[in-house]
Image (cartoon, rainbow, N blue to C red):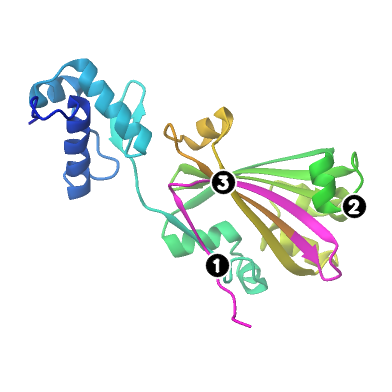
Amino acid sequence: MVDKTSGVPLHRQVAADLRRRITAGEYAAGDKLPSERLMIERYGVSRLTVREAIGLLRTEGVVIAEHGRGVFVRPSAKIQRLSRSRLSRAARAADKSAFLADAATGGFTPSSSVHVRFEAADERTATYLEVQPGEEVTVRDRVMRADGQVVQLSVSRLPRTFTRGTKVEKVETGPGGAYARLEEAGHTIGRYAEHVGSRMPTPEEASALQLSQGTPIITVTRVAYREDDVPLEMNDMVLPADRYELSYEWAAE
């Protein structure tokens, strides 16, 4: 199964064959790969070579290793994040938040966990929200899952002057989400601005998103503005780059 005279490192040959089998569908998403013992016998190589091959596939994001369980083919489906209507009032009226809209488009089952806290605005938050540093803000810290897998970390910060006494400060915000509650309180949203970047994850982000070594993240900071251009919310999102496609549309002028 490997050519020891080719000059190509043996672990790369093993990785190439496993990658080919995965691409061909012999091993589908979620399938467990053969044990180290079976691969040693199949390829006629050492345990170290097999581990190096698996390490290469993990770095590429092709497989994931679960301690005590084995190595599995990583799901490759991307989540398409459409800008067209995901934040519209019509979507809120139908109780389809931005992530629920992504789920409807992508055909996955969404779930999330939410933690609400309050903190003093740091310099960056104060700049985006146009408040004074140290001013109290409401923080909604969310972990978003697709079919049980963490695919997004999202932290919203809002001036507490706009959220006090509303369900924005509760874990469950009700139909239409936090934006619907803001508009009910008289803060009609006029526009959004998104700032997109990329970087390597922190160790905490890599752990939460179960990222393979070397996988970058996409960062999105969205600011929601009231009709009079007063910032209502700053939302920092972290997305695994190998799971997302960001799609934007706008009219030619």
Task: State the image coordinates of residue 81 (x, y, percent, origin top left).
Answer: 52, 60
Task: State the image coordinates of residue 130 (x, y, percent, origin top left).
Answer: 87, 53
Residue 155 sits in which quadrant?
A: top right
Task: Identify the element where label 2 is drawn.
Answer: helix
Q: Which mark is residue 161?
A: 2
Judge left or right: residue 56 versus residue 241. left
- Residue at horizontal 73 percent and vertical 57 percent from the top: 223
Amino acid on which disc 1 is placed: Tyr
- Residue at horizontal 37 percent and vertical 33 percent from the top: 59
Amino acid on which disc 2 is placed: Thr
Residue 83 sits in which quadrant?
A: bottom right
| Residue 121 appears in view | no
Badge nearest the viewer, 1 or 3: 3
Q: Is residue 136 above or below residue 78?
A: above
Q: Which residues are magenta?
A: 224-253
Q: CA distance from mark 2 to mark 1?
A: 32 Å
Judge left or right: residue 188 versus residue 67. right
- The residue at which mark 3 appears reads as 198
Whether label 3 touches label 2, CB < 8 Å = no
Task: State the image coordinates of residue 70 (x, y, percent, origin top left).
Answer: 29, 26
